[in-house]
Amino acid sequence: NQSTVQFSEQTTLMLAVRDNRDRAAFAALFDFFAPRLKGFAIRSGAKGGQVEDIVQDVMLTVWRKADQFDPQRAQVSAWIYQIARNRQIDVMRKENKPVPEELHYEVEDEPDAGQILAVEQEAEHLKKAISRLKPEQRAMIEQAYLGELSHQDIRELTGLPLGTIKSRIRLGLEKLRHELRGIR
Amino acid sequence: MADINHHIPESLLQAYATGSLVHPFALVVAAHISLCTECRAGLEAHNAAGGAILESLPDEPVSDDLKVRILDQLDAPFKQKPVYERSGVYPGPVMEALKGAAPRWRRVGMGVRQSILSAGQDGSVRLLFIPPGQAVPDHSHNGLELTLVLQGSFSDETGRYGVGDLEVANQDLEHTPIADAGAPCICLAATDAPLRFKGLVPRILQPVFRI
Ligand SMILES: [Zn+2]
Ligand SMILES: [Zn+2]
């Protein structure tokens, strides 16, 4: 049950935005993410006024599309990363990045607190794994996820330590799939 | 949900997640993920890694008034981008590329038809309609070719591909995909270079049909 389980601060804030349209919670998310999104936009090659325009678009999307936030599948930072990446492509390449269909849920499905905690835990493991990398390896991963590497560069990357989290998230999603009705 | 045996290779999925994949391939990847829970989970994992990197970035101070400006806009009306739902065998991202309309098929000979979704410097992506038993002409590739089956199935030197399966072919592969018996095979195919056909006639036709 959601009320008896302690989620991370970010998840709690984002659920308050999603479920209660809580502006104070949104402002707190802004304080944490906006300066990082600005750094992300600069590293990805945005220039001048483009940079804060991207930050603004991403944060407004977080507010407007909050109903698509699903902590059973993605942590807040993962969800915002995806929004930011897509927005940057739209702005910088002037094309829409094709995105997969949204999953369709049955409304009466109760959120699974255990699943949400598992996703948070895996994200925490991943963060630790990345912070323990050798500096060159870490720089490489940063470059890849900040969009500084081409597809060809990425083909040559090997040994990214993502295997564990991927298999666990996969298991989690498999479990989720069985619980959901109405997925095509 | 279809039983999918051929998935997105890891490097392609990562390139898609990080935004370094050109549009024609990104469309095929998005279409496959729409059909495949396993690759959707893989994408979520890459987003988790991206999120971890995002969180670890140093603060870049924002303008003093940015927060107020954004808070002021929370209730402002905004234009929602249209969402394209799956229609028949076509996943949402394909329907978006078709702008919600049915494919406009053009004959390319031997009963094979195509509908080009986009073609440009970054490569091209098209729908192919192949009658049962019919082959896509023998060809090799200058670069990468991704083929996603949306209806029916085809087989070539590397195996059999049914609905949801993704074939990844590079310049080392010369293959002749043949549609299996049953329903006509409909595929979404992307290349980053024009296909080179071996037969004389198809080569002459190439500029005409932009294959
Ligand atoms: Zn897959
Ligand atoms: Zn081919």
Image (cartoon, coloured by chain):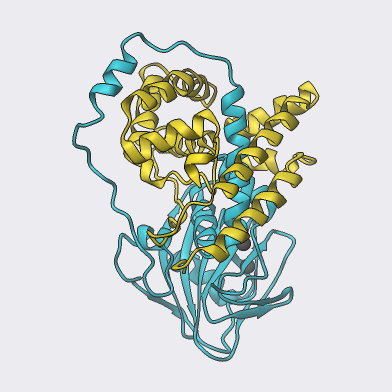
Instruction: Estimate the x, y position of residue B80 in percent, counting from the top left.
Output: 26, 45
Q: Position of residue A165 (x, y in %)?
A: 70, 44
Pinpoint residue B41: horizontal percent, then vertical percent: 60, 53
- In the displayed structure, B164 sits above or below A38; it is below
With A44 as the anchor, is A127 left or right in this view? right
In the rendered structure, the colour chosen for chain A is: yellow
Q: From this view, report whether residue A79 is shown above or below residue B33.
A: above
Say which residue appears at 40% left-offset and 47% top-offset.
Answer: A68
Quarter of the image containing the N terminus of chain B? bottom right
Residue B146 seen anywhere in this rendered image of the structure: yes
According to the colouring, which chain is cyan?
B
Rendered residue at 37%/10% (across/down):
B63
Instruction: Please report the residue visible at 54 percent of the width from the left and 58 percent of the height from the top.
Output: B33
Residue B117 visible to the viewer: no
Q: Nearer the viewer, residue B70 or B174?
A: B70
Q: Quadrant of ligand 2?
A: bottom right
**In the displayed image of the protein, which residue is found farthest to the front?**
A4
